[in-house]
Image (spheres, rainbow, N blue to C red):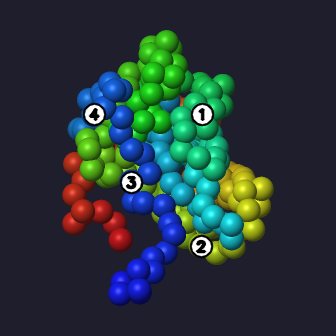
Amino acid sequence: MRLMGIAAIYPGKRLSQGDSRHRKYPYLLKGLTVDRPNQVWAGDITYVRTRHGFVYLVAILDWFSRYVLSWAVSITLDAEFCIEALGQALTWSKPEIFNSDQGSQFTSTSFTGILESKGIAISMDGRGRAFDNIFIERLWRSVKYEEVYLREYDGVKEAVRGLGTYFRFYNQERPHQSLGYKTPYQVYKSRDDPGTVPIRIPTVTRSTFPP
């Protein structure tokens, strides 16, 4: 394949390309103890394969409960679908801190302006440090292995239906060992549940990241 110049068509590893014109913010989560819902939210983008190409998926996650507050799908990597997902999440509540990578979707003034207007502190991963956003990386692993890799979506509409079904299952039916075998919905809605152990954000290296 190399000799013949044949290569698969697939999205590159870095879906969120930075924009030097946009302001970058420091990472605020190192060593932080997360002990309640709506203390920290995180956003990230991944890709989903269909028979007719790839679509892009953004999700916004509450770190403490692992509850997926909102998600959106797009056929392009512009900022609009991320802004749409943020708006949906903010109908639930608002976080003290919002964390993302340094991609242009999240550093755009349209996106950061919404956060700043609501008094939300902005945190961004260091360049090349995917594990700074470890809980949403674990979400993507669950989405891919429990849903996407088991299906063959015909197109965008089927992908949206499948993902919608999965996120309802993930939020309301799928128990997490780290949450005391409760669902993300149960922990997020309980808010001050004394039975849930606070999360301390580790400094994660590749050797300690779970397989």
Q: Which of marks 2 and 4 is nearer the N terminus?
A: 4
Q: How crowded is mark 1: few (under 14 residues within 10 Å), some or many (20 or more)?
A: some
Mark 3: amino acid = Arg
Side of 84 where 18 appears, left or right: left
**Could you give the CA–CA distance between mark 2 and mark 3, rounded to whole angstroms?**
20 Å
Residue 149 is marked as 2
Q: Earlier in the sequence, mark 2 or mark 3?
A: 3
Mark 4: amino acid = Tyr
SS for dot 1: helix
Residue carrying label 3: 14
Q: Which of marks 3 and 1 is nearer the N terminus?
A: 3
Q: Of circles 2 and 3, which is in front?
A: 3
**Could you give the CA–CA distance between mark 3 and mark 4, rounded to whole angstroms?**
19 Å
Residue carrying label 4: 27
Above or below 63: residue 135: below
Q: Residue at x 31, y 40 (%)?
A: 125
Residue carrying label 1: 80
Q: Residue at x 41, y 30 (%)?
A: 107
SS for dot 3: loop
Q: Residue furthest front?
A: 4
SS for dot 2: helix
Circles 4 and 1: CB atoms closer than 8 Å: no
Residue 100 is marked as none
Mark 1: amino acid = Glu
Side of 96 where 149 appears, left or right: right
Residue 180 seen anywhere in this rendered image of the structure: no
Q: Of circles 3 and 4, which is in front?
A: 3
